[in-house]
Image (cartoon, grey):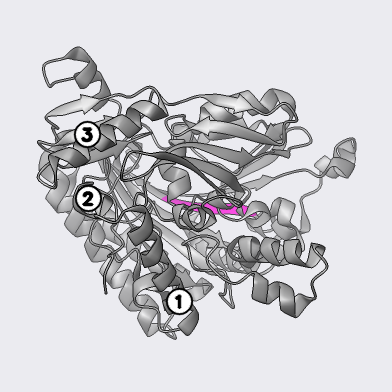
Amino acid sequence: MFPADKGYQSQQARYWASNQADFTPSCRISPTTSEEVGTLVSQLVEFGDDVKFAVSSGGHATAFGASNIDDGITLDLSALDSVSLASDRSYVDVGTGARWLDVYRALDPWGLTVAGGRAASVGVGGYLLGGGISLFSSLCGWGADSVDSIEVVLANGTIVTASASTHSDLLACLKGGANNFGIAISFRIKTFPTHGLLRVSLLQYAHEHLPAVLDALSNFTQNAHLDLNSASADLSVGFDTTLNNPEHNNTVYMLMLTRLIPLEEQPDVATDEKFPQLWQSFFDIPTLSTSTWRSSMSDVAQLVEMSNPYGFRVYKTTMTVRNDAILLARITDLVTTSLQDEAFVRGEPVLQAGLLVQPLTLPHLRYARDQAQAEHQGQGQGLAQAQAQAQGPRNLMLLEDEAEALILLSLEAHYLHSGHSARYTALMDGILAQAEHLARSSNNALHPFRYGNYAAKGQDVWGLLTRGEKEHTRRILDQVRDVQRRYDPIGVWENMLSGGFRIPSKA
């Protein structure tokens, strides 16, 4: 499809962040089968490095040029959106172009779910290749950790299935390795039972209680291992000029808690009236509003979608810090003050911006490693032998050896006018720089992890991999570069594929 075609224009309009549509590829191609993708890649490679192309699945990425390109070719994989539940219901096969709402709607009637995206319209492919944070991360690790196999098109156009038994090295690199190793076509994802509806609570707080909320969140993060079913909490600090508050207090502090109710508690109505112990400190703090209800995963995803609407230009950037409530309070104050100054001193009629505070609990970070060790122990090996056998990357998030839980922060601005892009990029980058300085000054609490699904262009997403000083990390880097050489010897993804964050194939 070419720029004058209606189909081209329709695809351009489907990007969640409308600034991705600023790019105008020479043409857009929409393959409908994995074979068509393989053929297209082979043909593109024949053209040589002068031809550049981009790949879009769900179109939810925000980094500059992540899923679109000027003058080159964009492969739109949205038609690869099949969802097929296995006959024994232990896994679901999902096309890379499916949205998570498609998956949840297929699984809800069976009382099943997966560790997937929280917002309904997020695409499956980019989410899983970037790692993926879910409501069940403390139970299941990264979203990618629940993937049993991936059908992927390699740089020579051939199609392979990467699994634990075939191309296992490639599978590990695809989990968190973004688009550095191939074009993912479909994913086989483990399912697990929900035992009924989830329990969801939304608590809105006044600014004066925010330090207490952050202290409670810090304790929650530290103690998540005590109740993995209840270990889902996200604090949103949302600023919105359209609230039109006469006192210029346009910031909303909203905490979302989600619980997978164990089977043994399902028939117990009395249990539903009590809060999990892990949540109690949040409810001890005065709120402006409190809502608690039972919900399907589909409904939760649509609720989250409401606070992430289409139609805005989006700039997003990220950082990670140690679990320090005082530091989080200082960063939150910095964000709210900076946004209020920007909106009410300089003036902006429509600006939605803020900070998302998300725990990265130890059960989440260590899940893949612990599962590998348990599997080897189940084969009759002792603990020491199981730990040795479980060495090597299981994903490229590289956080499984962390000694303490972390806090992931996402800074983002949603605005309407293209002429404001430079202004809001500078604003959010400035806030980030100040927040990083605060973290460095607070017992060196700034962590080098930068989550690729939230990162802005230019952020060092692969710093843990390429600049790690531990022998274990250097060994993983050698393994990753070996995978790159064997599966992409001529550097197609590094030299021809636009967008995303490239892992350098050489030191």
- Lateral position of residue 288 relative to residue 2, left or right: right
Under tag 2, what secondary structure? helix
Q: Nearer the viewer, residue 474 or 62?
A: 474
Question: Closest to the observer: 235 or 311?
Answer: 311
Please name the residue shown 26% across and 36% down the image.
42
Quarter assignment of residue 65 = top left
Q: Main secondary structure of the magenta part?
A: strand
The first of marks 3 and 2 along the sequence is: 3
Real-space CA distance between mark 3 and mark 2, rounded to the nearest whole angstrom:
53 Å
The amino acid type, in three-letter code, at marker 3 is Gln
Q: Amino acid at mark 2?
A: Phe
User: Mark 3 or mark 1, which is nearer the start of the sequence?
Assistant: 3
Region of the chain picked out in magenta, as a range = 232-237
Residue under pointer 3: 43
Q: Residues within 10 Å of mark 2 (few under 14, many from 20)?
A: few
Where's residue 20, x and y in %? 22, 38
- In this rendering, position of residue 441 left or right of residue 403: left
The residue under label 2 is 344
Q: Position of residue 10 (x, y in %)?
A: 25, 19
Which amino acid type is shown beneath numbered disc 1?
A: Arg
- 1 or 2: tag closer to the N-terminus: 2
Q: Residue 357 placed where, x, y %?
A: 48, 58
Q: Is residue 168 magenta?
A: no
**Callout 1: SS:** helix
Instruction: Determine the secondary structure under disc 3.
Output: helix
| Label 3 packing within 10 angstroms: few (<14), some (14-19), many (20+) | few
Disc number placed over residue 475 in the picture, else none = 1
